[in-house]
Amino acid sequence: MPDPNYTYLAFERDSERLYNHWLDIKAESPHDLLRRFNDLFIEGVGYQDQEILQVRNRILNSPWSEQNFKHILNRCCYILINNWWSEEKIEIHQATPRLVALFKTKPVLPSTTPETDCLRKLTQAFTQTQQYEMLEQRLRIDGGCLNRDQIGNDNSRQPISELVNRYPPLYPYYLQDDDTGDGKQYAIAQLQARREKQFEQHLSRYIINRLRHPDTRMADDNPTLLSDQQLTQAVKLFAGKAKGSRSYQDSARHFFASLDHAQSHFVVKQQIHNYLTTSIDPGYSDRHFNTWLHEQLNNALPHNDHHRPGESLLVKTCGHLLDALIAHPKNLSNSNHLSSNHVVFLDLNSNLGTTHTIGLVLKIVLLCRTVQTNLDAIKARVAKRFAEMFKYYEVQVQGQVSWLTECLDNLMVAYAIHFGRGGVSRWESLL
């Protein structure tokens, strides 16, 4: 029976009691937490903590339950998921799919109270909400496979949305859900760091096995969806020499040395133009890319052209270039056409190949590495742009947008080599 004296303030306090309850017991094993969750929210009977059971029933009997209970369920789920994602044990991560799947199971025990009837109705309705859809999105990251052999022989027919777990830099920007708790960012960052470390270790094993046993295919060698030949070429390019006589690191150092002679930011932008085009086939860049790049640099902070060069202006200009290069595919003025900058990106991939296109992105990122916070910010910018692009194409199968997964695989390789724990010199020594 609804309590006429039960206020909305009391409803909010009871909601917080539920959240605090899950926070208090989150250290229990996933098995025990899933059993508790099932008893309290799915079956609705048999929960041992009578105080929490009464809190739940007051919420269900309130006039706000129908509208707000989905948000309460959602928050309780994320409290558990974020805690599991912060742990390193693989078996803990497997709890997330089981938690989300609980909502699709039918209660076994008969309902004996109006509160249980109400609960089961609201829980069933939760599976039709946007909140539940976002929970299922989490499964693409937590429950997907990282082993290419598990994807299947014909992965060209697989929607690329099922592959997002392979690209950890995208996680923070792909997961745009209702979880606003403090634990979300930490949990995602922890999972991202573990997956990137795992990728770097697998890539290192691949290179060692490939060079020492070139005729033997190891069971877990290739950590990407690139062919063995594509991956070997990518590693050699990013760890060795770009087109020309200099490596990516050498080219960046040469650029910074030339800044000593730059009198204005306008001159710096001219030097950026030269820096980026030296590794591109002149036959291509002279036809298309030079004009586009010149236009983008002219439009980057033109009011600062006569200012003295500085780190801040350089980083902002690099950010402007990356926003243009990895632009959102959607044309805001005409939804039937792609944005002009995205067409340039597609053209680069078609003419230079995905590895050299990502090499261009890498060259821009390397201009921001002198200060760690700037490097982190510019890498986040790249990740956000690719996440937006990924979301735009995610309903398509891999065979239709193989260039995108190839770009992301190349980005993972480039980042592992240049920003991983071993440093570029370690990878050079392996070649």
Image: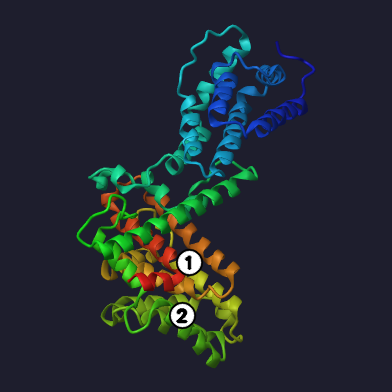
For mark 1, does the 10 Å Cα neighbourhood hold few (<14), some (14 to 19), or many (20 or more) residues?
Answer: some
Is 6 left or right of 200, judged from the image as shown? right
- Residue at 45% x, 69% y is 418
Image quarter (top left, top right, bottom left or bottom right) of the N terminus = top right
Is 239 left or right of 149, judged from the image as shown? right
* Mark 1 to mark 2 CA distance (whole Å): 14 Å
Find disc 1 in the rendering and name its residue: 419
Q: Is residue 10 above or below residue 282?
A: above
- Residue at 40% x, 79% y is 276
Find disc 2 in the rendering and name its residue: 252
Q: Secondary structure at mark 2?
A: helix
What's the coloring here?
rainbow
Viewer-closest of 396 and 300 = 396
Q: Nearer the viewer, mark 1 or mark 2?
A: 1
Image quarter (top left, top right, bottom left or bottom right) of the C terminus = bottom left
Q: Is residue 94 above or below residue 323?
A: above
